[in-house]
């Protein structure tokens, strides 16, 4: 891969490797080629099968072609070596995969002094012990973990919660719609098209997880609820969240390709629920709730058309934060909660914050 002279017009202070060149990773590559990303330079990129690395710099717009031509085997160590060889003072691994294996490495990377910026929720939204390890590792490595993309695709909800927590405010309850894909699906599911057809569209628009059962099964929403609760100081674990799955038992354990061919099997049950809700004057929304007694639940709920969740559009997420100081009226954050551009912007925002903090 040839060096990129234009990139070196900026100080080489922040070197990046990018894991994952799917919809989010690609959108980030586009942003890295814009002036907003001055001072950030890419030294490696990988998908699940191939990688490229060059400590002197990789041109973001050439990553696809270079990966296509690459014969380098997948090896995270070689990517970390490129970060080290770059000489940059700030070395960052960006995780835009949905891989549990990569997420399991975040703590080790932090402990070794690499910053991590992640859209992947598997490290922070699953086991509480992993969350705790990660925060200990970041302290040990004196580095930061950027996670703005993991909740609300970068809506300012985690930053707000953390600021309230730092001010001594206490989160009492959390309510809302935490999934962009499920929001989009139920905002459009009016009986005119089968649910499975809408799901194919949501997948094509890049709103769903690589395996849409992670969305439909409630796991993605539960992860976000856990990330939010933990960021507000609540030590919640996976077993503390009651999850209602929309995936019927016969579709849960088959491989993803089979599931994608059999999505029509979702239609009967979900259309019956929609029709029943409509007969009773309501609509379906996939809601998340953490109540004041620490009970957490995610699942499909029938709501009245006047309910705030019934008035969302597109991929809107809605986060209603009830805290000691926002008790009479919750603090509400609403906006698009999925999609490549907004998610990549959240990653870029974390990278720029890191760069600023390291320079300060
Ligand atoms: N799509 C969205 O709106 C949002 C996505 N996210 C998160 O962003 C992440 C990526 O999502 P998408 O781009 O939609 O998925 P995608 O399926 O389009 O892309 C995933 C990429 O990761 C690569 N990959 C898988 N395992 C890998 C490994 N071990 N090493 C390197 N690359 C590997 C795949 O080859 C692919 O390039 C997920 O964790 C998702 O939860 C977060 C917020 C919003
Ligand atoms: N699949 C997720 C993408 C963002 O996290 C969602 O639907 O919200």
Image (cartoon, rainbow, N blue to C red):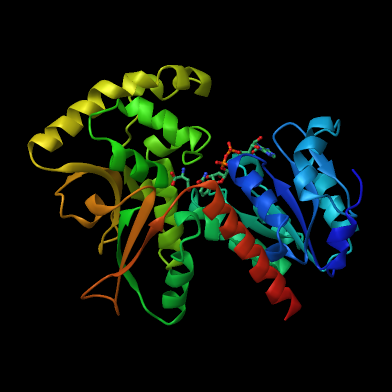
Q: Residue at x 34, y 45 (%)?
A: 183
- Residue sitting nearer the eye, 242 or 302: 302
Give how far across and how far down residue 276 sits, in percent: 12, 32
- Where 214 falls versus 332 (above or below)? above
Q: Residue at x 45, y 23 (%)?
A: 253
Give how far across and how far down residue 195 sits, in percent: 32, 28
Q: State which quadrant residue 358 falls in.
A: bottom right
Q: State which quadrant residue 308 falls in.
A: bottom left
Ligand 1's quadrant is top right
Q: Residue at x 37, y 26 (%)?
A: 197
Q: Which quadrant of the figure contains the C terminus?
A: bottom right
45 sits left or right of 134 in the view: right
35 sits left or right of 326 in the view: right
Q: Residue at x 27, y 70 (%)?
A: 330
330 sits left or right of 70 in the view: left
- Where 287 falls versus 169 (above or below)? above
Give how far across and how far down residue 267 sits, in percent: 29, 23
Is residue 178 visible to the viewer in this orientation of the structure?
no
- Residue sitting nearer the eye, 154 or 358: 154
Q: State which quadrant residue 275 falls in.
A: top left
- Where 97 falls versus 232 (above or below)? above
Q: How many marks?
A: 0
Give how far across and how far down residue 337 sits, in percent: 43, 52
Q: Residue furthest left?
A: 280
Is residue 287 visible to the viewer in this orientation of the structure?
yes
- Where 208 falls versus 295 (above or below)? above
Q: Which quadrant of the figure contains the N terminus?
A: top right
């Amino acid at each position: 891969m040839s060096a990129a002279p234009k990139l070196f017009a900026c100080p080489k202070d922040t070197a990046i490797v990018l894991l994952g060149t799917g919809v989010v990773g690609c959108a980030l590559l586009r942003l890295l080629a814009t002036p907003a990303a001055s001072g950030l330079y890419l030294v490696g990129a990988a998908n699940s099968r191939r990688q490229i690395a060059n400590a002197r710099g990789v041109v973001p717009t050439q990553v696809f072609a270079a990966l296509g031509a690459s014969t380098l085997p997948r090896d995270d160590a070689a990517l970390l070596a490129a970060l080290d060889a770059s000489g940059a003072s700030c070395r960052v691994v960006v995780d835009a995969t949905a891989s549990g294996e990569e997420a399991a490495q975040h703590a080790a990377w932090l402990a070794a002094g690499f910053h991590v910026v992640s859209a992947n929720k598997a490290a922070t939204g699953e086991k509480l012990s992993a969350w705790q390890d990660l925060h200990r590792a970041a302290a040990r490595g004196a580095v930061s973990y950027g996670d703005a993309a993991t909740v609300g695709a970068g809506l300012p909800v985690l930053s707000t919660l953390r600021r309230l927590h730092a001010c001594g405010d206490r989160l009492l309850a959390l309510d809302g719609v935490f999934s962009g894909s499920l929001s989009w699906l139920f905002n459009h599911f009016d009986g005119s098209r089968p649910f499975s057809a809408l799901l194919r569209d949501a997948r094509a628009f890049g709103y769903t997880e690589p395996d849409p059962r992670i969305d439909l099964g409630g796991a993605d929403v539960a992860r976000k609820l856990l990330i939010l609760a933990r960021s507000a100081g609540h030590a919640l674990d996976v077993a503390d969240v009651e999850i209602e799955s929309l995936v019927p038992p016969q579709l849960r354990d088959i491989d993803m390709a089979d599931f994608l061919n059999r999505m029509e099997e979702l239609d009967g049950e979900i259309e019956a629920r929609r029709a029943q809700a409509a007969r009773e004057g309501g609509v379906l929304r996939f809601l998340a709730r953490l109540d004041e007694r620490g009970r957490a639940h995610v699942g499909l709920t029938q709501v009245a058309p006047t309910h705030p969740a019934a008035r969302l559009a597109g991929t809107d997420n809605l986060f209603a934060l009830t805290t000691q100081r926002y008790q009479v009226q919750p603090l509400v954050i609403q906006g698009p909660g999925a999609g490549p551009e907004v998610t990549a912007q959240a990653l870029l925002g974390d990278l720029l914050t890191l760069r600023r903090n390291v320079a300060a």
